[in-house]
Image (tube, rainbow, N blue to C red):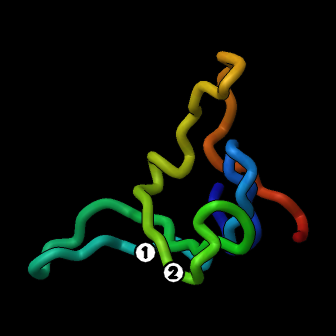
Amino acid sequence: MITRGFYRHWKGGVYFVHGIADLEIDGTVGRAIVVYESIQGVNDDGRMRARSRTDFDALVQDGDGRTVPRFTRIESW
């Protein structure tokens, strides 16, 4: 379950998730998206970002070929 808090990206950056939102386009509510911002890392520019909940929760292949979560919740930063 994705909740408000800090998450580490599999490449090492730290992000703060503000919450889950419904993507609405022209009055039609689509899929759920995760709204987050970079705290530390490559994309540390203060901009808000959004990614589909499915993509945020996805498993990816790391540089060593292991399957890992794209984002992992961390207790604090």
Left or right: where 73 falls relative to 48: right
Write the residue at 35% across / 72% down: 22
Q: Quadrant of the C terminus?
A: bottom right
Where disc 1 sits, the SS reads strand
| Residue 21 marker | 1
Left or right: where 47 falls relative to 44: left
Write the residue at 45% across / 47% down: 54
Answer with mark 1 or mark 2, whichever residue precedes in sequence: 1
Q: Quadrant of the N terminus?
A: bottom right
Q: Quadrant of residue 75?
A: bottom right
Q: Quadrant of residue 70?
A: top right
Cα separation, mark 1 vs mark 2, equals 17 Å
Q: Using a 10 Å C-alpha cutoff, classify the residue at mark 2 as few (fewer than 14 neighbours), some (14 to 19) or many (20 or more).
A: few
Q: What residue type is disc 2 on?
A: Arg
Give the residue furthest to the top.
65
Classify 36 as above or below 13. below
Write the residue at 68% across / 44% down: 11
Where residue 59 sits: x, y (%)? Answer: 58, 33
Q: What residue type is disc 1 on?
A: Ala
Viewer-closest of 15 and 29: 15
Left or right: where 54 falls relative to 75: left
Give the residue furthest to the left.
26
Viewer-closest of 72 and 61: 61
Where residue 23 sits: x, y (%)? Answer: 30, 71
| Residue 47 marker | 2
Write the residue at 24% across / 64% down: 30
